[in-house]
Image: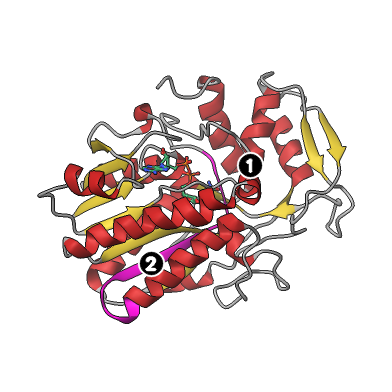
Amino acid sequence: MKVLVTGGAGYIGSHTVKKLCELGFDVTVLDNLCLGHVDAIDKNATFVQADLLDKNGIHRKLANQKFDAVIHFAANSLVGESVEKPMKYIGDNVQMAVNLLGWMQENNINKFILSSTANLFGKPNKIPIDEDTEIIPGSPYGESKYIIERMLACLGGSNKITYTSLRYFNAAGAYKDASIGEDHKIETHLIPLVIQVALGKRDKITIFGDDYETKDGTCIRDYVHVSDLATAHILALKHLGDNNSSTVYNLGSGNGYSVKEVVDAVQKITGKAVKYEVGNRRAGDPPMLIASSNKIKKELGWVPKYDNLEKIISSAWEWHKNNPNGFRH
Ligand SMILES: NC(=O)c1ccc[n+]([C@@H]2O[C@H](COP(=O)([O-])OP(=O)(O)OC[C@H]3O[C@@H](n4cnc5c(N)ncnc54)[C@H](O)[C@@H]3O)[C@@H](O)[C@H]2O)c1
């Protein structure tokens, strides 16, 4: 199977590419490297440097190439930035998808997997969050993913495409041999930030609010290992290959851990003290987000291997302690 992976130089994309290559898929990565790293791309994949916002460039650079499916990771995905710069999200994220889907249609490629997000659900009123939970996006970033999901539903409805949308909760961890891991140019994710304090690269972290109605007052999130996410993409690809039906899945470990529990676990695993301060709540932060992934477990047989926080943080630590400055290129 020949697969085009957009954003394959980024965090989740590079882990999925590595797993696809290990399994013998023929993989081409399309990435403009604005956020990704060339060193993160598996050597067995073909790399095409292109910008998804440049419609003509995509057509030119992918001319005469045939693919069986496309996995679309490329996006801007900083929730806070999306509130300040909504057009970078509602504009660019949607435009990238429009250009990609347009190119797919012209080239008769009709299998598509989207990286979607838990941010679709904003502040949900029931936990765990399953696929029937009402969608009220929590930010322009979440809105951009919802617009793309709606676009896919229209294309799916007219049989132009068969798609799977995977709505990830909080991705974390690194590849099993720690050869690649998380290295965002602007890091906003809790686990790498806490590890940076343990590594002495950051003085302290701020916990945004400790007066939520949760077990210790801090926000609870669902951390899902990046390799378990990669496996879900491979199951979804196989399913799209065998079936002609489109669907959406929520992807989390199903376990919720508080910010303080993450800090404690990092201290335990690294053996280093982590200094923190408590700041004000951030606008829009829901107290608790935990996924129900029963649908993908039942329909595709997905089983997360990293089923607790210590396993996930130990995996992240292996990467960060050996690569404190991230990728070279
Ligand atoms: N990391 C998470 O916890 C998380 C959670 C939910 C959803 N997601 C979604 O998963 C996807 C991947 O997330 P990530 O953390 O790996 O992000 P990332 O920033 O590490 O990777 C995104 C990749 O897309 C590329 N890219 C961006 N704009 C591009 C463009 N115009 N043309 C070509 N390439 C471009 C970047 O260079 C980068 O390599 C995103 O769509 C994100 O919204 C991530």
How far apart are labels 2 and 1 at the CA level?
Answer: 30 Å
Task: Identify whether 148 is placed above or below 205.
Answer: below
Sequence-wise, the earlier of marks 2 and 1 is 2
Q: State the residue at coordinates (74%, 37%).
A: 263
Q: Residue at x 60, y 35 (%)?
A: 187
Element at label 1: helix
User: What's the amino acid at mark 2?
Assistant: Thr
Query: Which of the 4 quarters of the picture holds residue 284?
Result: bottom right
Q: Is residue 36 above or below residue 74?
A: above
Quadrant of the drawing holding the N terminus: bottom left
Q: Position of residue 241 (x, y in %)?
A: 23, 67
In magenta segment, residue 244: no
Q: Residues within 10 Å of mark 2 (few under 14, many from 20)?
A: many
- Left or right position of 310 against 273: left
217 or 66, which is in the foreground? Answer: 66
Q: Is residue 165 magenta?
A: yes
Residue kind at label 1, given as amino acid type: Glu
- The residue under the point 61% across, 64% down is 291
